[in-house]
Image: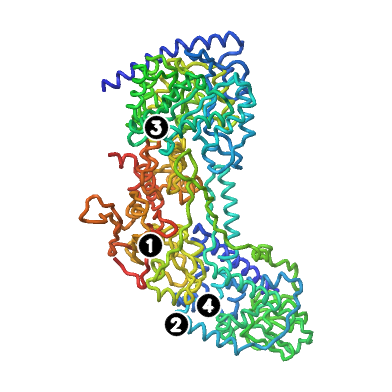
Amino acid sequence: MKLRNIRVALAVVFFTLITWLLLDFTGTAHHWLGWMARIQFLPAVLALNVVVVVLLVLLTLLFGRIYCSVICPLGVMQDIISWLRRKKSRFSYSPALTWLRLPLVALLAVSMAAGMGSIVALLAPYSTYGRIVANLLQPVYLWVNNGLAAIAEHYGSYAFYSREVWLRSLPTFVIAVATFGVIAVLAWRNGRTWCNTVCPVGTVLGYLSKFAWLKIRFRADHCKHCGQCASHCKASCIDFKNHTVDYTRCVTCGDCLDTCKFGALSYCAGSPNPPKGGLDDSKKQPGTLPSKGDGGIPEKGAGLDRRAFLVGGAIVAAEAALAQAGKKVDGGLAAIEDKAVAVRTTPLTPPGSASARHFAQHCTACQLCVTHCPNDVLRPSGILLTLMQPTMSYERGYCRPECTRCSKVCPTGAIHPIDTAQKSSTQIGHAVWVKANCVILRDRVSCGNCARHCPAGAIMMVQLDPSDDTSPLVPAVDRAKCIGCGACEYLCPARPHTAIYVEGHEVHKEI
Amino acid sequence: MSNKTYTRRNFLKVLGLAGATAATPAIVSCAGGDKPATAATGTDQEPPIGKMTYRTNPKTGDRVSLLGYGMMRLPTLDAGGGSAREEHDAEIDQEMVNRQVDYAIEHGVNYFDTSPAYCRGRSEHATGIALARHKREEFFIATKLSNFSPDTWSHEAGVEMFRNSLRELQVDYVDYLLLHAIGGGDDAMDEFNQRYIDNGILDYLIQQRDAGIIKNLGFSYHGDVAIFDHALKMHDSGKVKWDFVQIELNYLDWRFADEVNDSNTDAEYLYGELVRRDIPAVVMEPLLGGRLASLPEPLAAKLLARDPGHSVASWAFRYAGSFPNVLTVLSGMTYMEHLKENLNTYSPLLSLTDEEMKFLEGVAAEYVSYNIIPCTACQYCMPCPYGIDIPAVFGHYNKCLSEGCVPRSKEQADYQRARRAFLVGYDRSVPRLRQADHCIGCGHCEPHCPQRIRIPREMERISRYVDALKAGNAEGLVDPHLRTED
């Protein structure tokens, strides 16, 4: 009882805050809660964050898989879905699917080593949750925010500003919907099936928790074989007939402790048959009264309700087209055609990611940087091998020199923290001029917007024909100076295909 | 320097004139009602009926209401309730146009000014519908030959444009017809000749006047003063007799038009030239597209402190109305509130005293120091072929200047607040793809601007400023107006 309440309270706090961290595009949440992403197991491993990994291992060796019940948002999400179902006693013991669990751990390890980010992203629990939030919940969050912004605007307040809601990547959206669907159905029916058969982190921590100091232990003499504990165990890990608990799957949720009316189960250290009463290890009073007011889980926890499902994809607001021939009457706005996403031989990875390989090997595609990118540059990649890992494109904005947000929020070290000075001297790609699209030649106007806005001063306007003084001035890129920020591509007036675009570099270099 | 003193003396001289002549209607109205004059013109109350100040057209004897209704900023059905100027796609709210026109006529307004170009070409039609519901003798209609596009420069196209105006307006004669905005274009003289002289359109219009289809022929002028002088020379030589001329006149343009933009001409000169020839002046932009209705806070406070009962805008209307040679003052009244406010100001006009004139002169001088971009949101520059919303960009920048949200230093006390207000407000006022940074500087807009704003240059400096503000780059924050001045 005591244990369960503490677990529920902590889980709700963690879950709410980490969800907010993933949603909040303003950076406020990250300022206070950035550490919550960093203490996730897989990101900490990838970031070689020894301190966190050691602490998590110790935590598990002390208390069992409490990580899965409290810190992992995907785990808590499943608990919430499972809890939403009225029938709490629907579970039963089933043997572990070890044949599936161990190969999946191996698959994750191999994928990580080989830089197959898409497989890592599919298996990693925190990333799976991040993807669900980024694709299903953030649009709702943004719409609410935009509503508030409209109200604020009405009252002349600048407290909220609106953000465009758009579909960053269809494949990722579909995968997010599918994973949420599968996990939700599994959780609705059988509780923690995902955690105990698929999740490699769950498996690793599970084998560690075999050696945990504190565990759920049976006192066979008290057991009346009523089976209540097993029917309430969402991990399906209590074999009450044999008085054993499969510790690789137990997530130390404490539900069974509450249901056992005979004191046959306790969470304690040492032998299964200690003195009397419940050595409800957490020292304090051996909980005698069974679950008092069990309104334990605040409504808040249900934030991600089933309705999130129904929320469709982000809609790119189509510019209101207005056919306007020559200038005959005043006013009106010329239609702006949407820009096509440039086809890049080498995809762009954000400054700080060092190289495409480093990035692919370290990124778990949690989408934290994507939801945070204030310039709408980052979006999940559509390339199979790095599917869902962020990549960059410049139709909606460019990688502004003052912004290093993605490098600050990345929990895995896929994007190393950098400062603005380092950023402005890191070459992630270089601009390429596409003569055929340039409005200077196509529309015969003077332009030079790319050169005017290049923060690196890498674009200059040169005579198209050096031997002819009257030939138009066209942009020329000094590749040595170009850092690949994309200001030129974003501000190029040629649509839908821009006349200048950035080609990525596989290895970033300092200039 | 000597030039300055001259202007100043001249200014005061005309002031004296204005004060003397305008005194008459004011006294008459005071005798009519027993309420004190200030209470009768308070801008917040229901406007009185039958108190409108009228001016007489010396040629026709028309009694024209001092308040003229400009049909350039008609109300729309857009939920936000903007005018047809800002809400590019929204449908015109005909019902509201009708109501406001009825209300205006009921309160003595009888001059309605439109053009085939206004509201993306929909203004004449809407004006026609509203006015057709009244007796033809009850109103004067002014429209224009708005042949801006080179493909309307032929004789046939000009004739067709005029005939179409008659159809749209549902009338068989036009009271006031204007050559629309002469003085614009890269080569203003060439454009003037091409639009009106070489194609014989001016001769055609003179014929129409002789035939009684046009009662008064005039022109509206912006831009190159050589064209203004040229047109008046034509008048002097008897080539064409102008019955009226429409100019921009307000307390900023009176003496500071050229300080805001050195290629503009002070209204003092324009007005003086018309007075010399006894040509009545129709005033446009009395509020400079609303800029004189929303002054920078310290200036607005000054006006309101002096007279809390009267709106900031009412000062500008009283100013324009105080010149005796002004036939009517046009105001594009989108909302009923505007209409009521202006009716109050002119029912009857309370002319400014010499002292008040000087006070406004001081306000104007101070206003100039804000470096506000002289855009009146007339939309003549639009549509920009690359999609920039030019008036919205300038509007936001000016608004921020007025509200003190254009921080010039990171050290200033309210830097964070001002920065946020500027940047968040910018995205609210102008969609990102229509902001200044997308201006490529092609210059298509520039010849169309009646205020002769160097639009691409201003776009570039705003873009630079915004960039500096976003990046928190202190150097970029210093007044860009001063930096790019050449």
Query: Residue A329 versus residue B285: which sits nearer the camera?
Result: A329
Q: Which residue is mark 4?
A: A56
Label 2: state its secondary structure: helix
* In the image, farthest residue toward the bottom: A242
The relative height of residue B252 versus residue A300 in the rendered view (above or below) is above
Residue B176 horizontal side relative to residue A355, left or right? right
Q: Which residue is mark 3?
A: B195
Residue name at image x 30 percent, y 22 percent: B4
Q: Label 1 vs label 4: CA separation?
A: 45 Å
Q: Could one spot residue B250 in this view of the protein?
A: no
Q: Nearer the viewer, mark 4 or mark 2?
A: 2
Q: Which residue is mark 1?
A: A501
Q: Label 2 vs label 3: CA separation?
A: 74 Å
The relative height of residue B271 versus residue B126 in the rendered view (above or below) is above
Q: Residue B305 at x, y = what percent? A: 50, 25
Residue A36 horizontal side relative to residue B264, left or right? right
Sequence-first tag of 1 and 4: 4
Residue name at image x 55 percent, y 55 percent: A317
The relative height of residue A37 versus residue B443 in the rendered view (above or below) is below
Label 1: state its secondary structure: strand
Picture quadrant of residue B188: top left
Circles 4 and 3: CB distance less than 8 Å?
Answer: no
Asked if both marks, 4 and 3, belong to the same chain, the answer given is: no
